[in-house]
Amino acid sequence: MVQEGDDGATGAMQAWPLTVNKFIEHAARWHGSRTVVSRAFDGSINRMSWADIHRHAAHLSNALVAYGIGQGDRVATLAMNSGRHVAAWYGIMGMGAICHTLNPRLSVEQLVYIINHAADRIVFVDRQFMPLIEQLQPQCPSLQTAIILDEDGQGCWDAFVDGQSDSFDWGAFDENSGAGLCYTSGTTGNPKGVLYTHRSNYLHTMMALQPDALGIGVREVIMPVVPMFHANGWSIPFAASAAGCKMVMPGAHLDGQSLHDLIEKESVTLVAGVPTVWFGLLEYVRKNGKEFTSLKRLFVGGAACAESLIRDFADYGVDVVHTWGMTELSPIGTVGRLTPEVLDLADDEQLGYRMAQGRPLLGIDMRVADENGQELSRDGATIGAIQVRGQAIVGRYFRAEEIALNDDGFFDTGDVGTIDARGYMRITDRAKDVIKSGGEWISSVDLENAAMSHPGVQLAAAVGIAHPKWNERPLLLVKRKAGNDVTEEDIHDVLARKLARLAIPDAILFTDDIPLGATGKIDKKRIRADYKDFYVERG
């Protein structure tokens, strides 16, 4: 179809709606034999081609229509990463329904709220999460049925799609129709839904494919360790099919040995996930004298990347690339690839840029602003609120009446930080996590990074705790690397070399368990609650 208009001012190009089914159609038609490898819950390996996934997705679209699902209806998934889960995404979105990814790490109370708020009608679920579904269903009146993704038989995928056609007329709707629904983790108040459109997902995928973003091409073998239920799976399932590359899905097995085994056996070149996963992988490789024969790039997001992680993986020939984003950004906002000017710097100077969150991608406009919404200098020193606008950024939360933007159309991310003259953004802290002590601001991110620069530290968490004299003082929790006997004095010496005296915490506590939230980030809300009276009781 050609757009109407012959007045010389209106274009006459083909109308080609930006709907996400274009990715799987391209993958099946031009890269149909390339594989998606999945590790099941029982450890077995399953292989599907992009042509297989296309066929399974078409079966599902037809089955959903036969069931009575229509455009805009919410269909949920509660599953780990797998080829079948990818087929569910495309089958749900392609026929016009909205794919709502549920996070199994959330509490039952949060999941009940989310399912009811979204009014999900069907959920596709991994077998291991069926006990959770059985808890949820009586409290979720809209949820009519659960279909098991990864097994045959009654109540499972194959029975649901039995007899359905291999073809479906996907994308027969406006590109601004809803495609996916993902809820924030709800660290303050109830979780909030972000409803992605086909257009926003399509354009965000084009952003992710950029060489200075994830840089995914057909020759890569990518393993998304980040779950598909976490902020659009960082767009990797879309990007991998758009590029037609091989994709490796680790499922629920995210320990160091399992990840290394898949990386080596499947010749993985790119991986992506949160820092805690990579510390576990690194620890396994070190303890067992392993190497990486194919892995070239490791993308870190979801939390600040420690200097030690960058240095240690470099010893194995792996380039660690810092990324930043959030559910509301679809989710990628910045990527820490190095510009020619930075590559000309000495290694130690480069390291500072590698630890920054990176530069905005095409499709993202970003600024640092003061409390009045006025843009601040990009000098790398002036701290303000990180605000963004763009083609794949939330404008209004799902079912919310008010828009989520300020008066001039920017979304306030809740992060505070700086942007320097080379365009590199650095997060100083989350606005809710910055520590105010004696009238001075202390960055919990800087404190954690300084502690984790010690080779004996695996993970560190810094929070502000009420103090009878200073309003707040930082408390630092430290998890040692296995077999290491790093002491409080050792940590104090490292902090003293890197931080102002005020920023050095009054207490450093060693622990075997730093709590993590539902998306693998440090759960600072829980730490603050557990230690809220620490300094008061200490006197």
Image (cartoon, grey):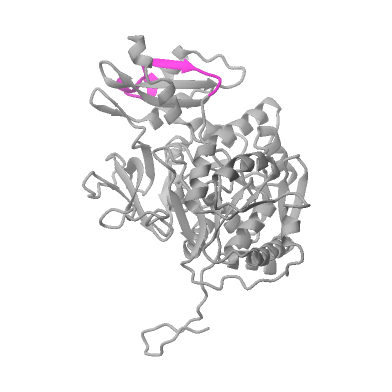
Q: Which of 451 and 212 is in front in this view?
A: 451
* Rendering quarter of residue 395: bottom left
Q: Nearer the viewer, residue 118 or 88?
A: 118
Q: Which of 476 and 456 is in front in this view?
A: 476
Task: Please tell me whether residue 456 is drawn above or below residue 169 in the rendered image.
Answer: above
Task: Please tell me whether residue 259 is drawn above or below residue 490 in the rendered image.
Answer: below
Residue 137 forms part of the magenta stretch: no
Q: Which of 438 and 60 is in front in this view?
A: 60
Relative image position of residue 495 (x, y in whole percent): 40, 21
Relative image position of residue 506 (x, y in whole percent): 36, 15
Can residue 469 be seen at all in this image of the molecule? yes
The residue stretch that appears in magenta? 495-513
Residue at point 61% right, 20% down?
482
Relative image position of residue 2 (x, y in whole percent): 50, 84
Task: Please tell me whether residue 154 is drawn above or below residue 290 in the rendered image.
Answer: below
- Going by the image, does 498 lie left or right of 127? left
